[in-house]
Image (cartoon, grey):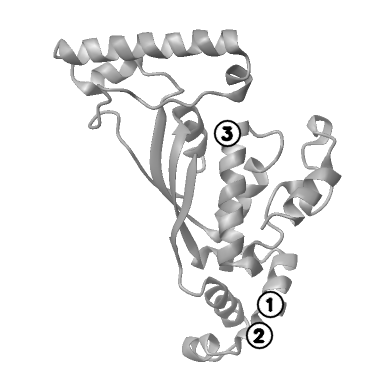
Amino acid sequence: MRVQLLTHTPDPEQVVAAAARLCYSDASIGQLLERAPEQAPKLLRKILDMGHLSVLEHASFSFGIEGISRACSHQLVRHRIASYSQQSQRYVSHDERFEAVTPTSIADRPELAARFAQHLDATQELYRGLLDAGVPAEDARFVLPNAAATKLVMTMNARELHHFFALRCCRRAQWEIRAMAREMLRLARAAAPLLFVDAGPGCLRGACPEGAMTCGEAAAVRKEYLELA
């Protein structure tokens, strides 16, 4: 899996701070943007604590993501307040070899890993045979598995990223999307630490929201994300 932060709103923290000030000020937008940067941390902390999160929607972050499975990307696109551009299996054929993601629960067990690899080899052979027989790639792709790797560019605003991290950084999230979300959060915090200082699974900000389904390791989770850099 490869995750990159491709670009983001310039000075995202200042933009969000200016938007927050605008709600309570008659100053011009230019004047608000020129306010001393050292005033931003206190203001951003206040709006995050108040839950005044609409102003976070003015900062957007674009990620390049490669080497995740189609099983993972199907989960990802359920987050609808985002923009996605994904590699097409209709126009990009994999007649030589399609990349696949192998779960560690299979990879760590040699007999199962061998059977998994055989299945992928047979699928590749069938897929190539369909292409050689003149079947269009858009139809041959029907035999490709959820394990098939994909790549995409995704853009989310900071508010939606908070929601995404709350759900997908949780230990109850599927392992692959959780690993991706964790790396995205690390990159987002590096770019805008004030906006994402307390972003992460829901138990960072209080009791575990999973109720009876909790992993029971909230203290360990808090420590993990406190140390995430």
Instruction: Say if residue 80 shows up in the picture.
Output: no
Is label 3 in a helix, a strand or a loop? helix
Is label 1 in a helix, a strand or a loop? helix
Q: Which residue position holds label 1?
A: 41
Residue 144's spot in the image, x, y percent? 36, 18
Q: Which residue position holds label 3?
A: 176
Q: Amino acid at mark 2?
A: Glu
- Tag 1 near tag 2, CB within 8 Å: yes
- Quadrant in the picture for the C terminus: bottom right
Q: Which residue position holds label 2?
A: 38
Q: Along the line of sight, which residue is nearer the eye, 229 or 108?
A: 108
Q: CA distance from mark 3 to mark 2?
A: 38 Å
Q: Along the line of sight, which residue is nearer the eye, 226 or 33?
A: 226
- Residue at the spot 76% in from the left edge and 48% down from the top edge: 224
The residue sitting at the left extreme is 134
Is label 2 in a helix, a strand or a loop? helix
- Residue at the spot 52% in from the left edge and 76% down from the top edge: 15
| Image-quadrant location for residue 122 | top left
Q: Is residue 95 left or right of residue 36?
A: left
| Crowd tier of the residue under label 3, counting other residues whose Cα lies within 10 Å: few below 14, some 14–19, many 20 or above | some
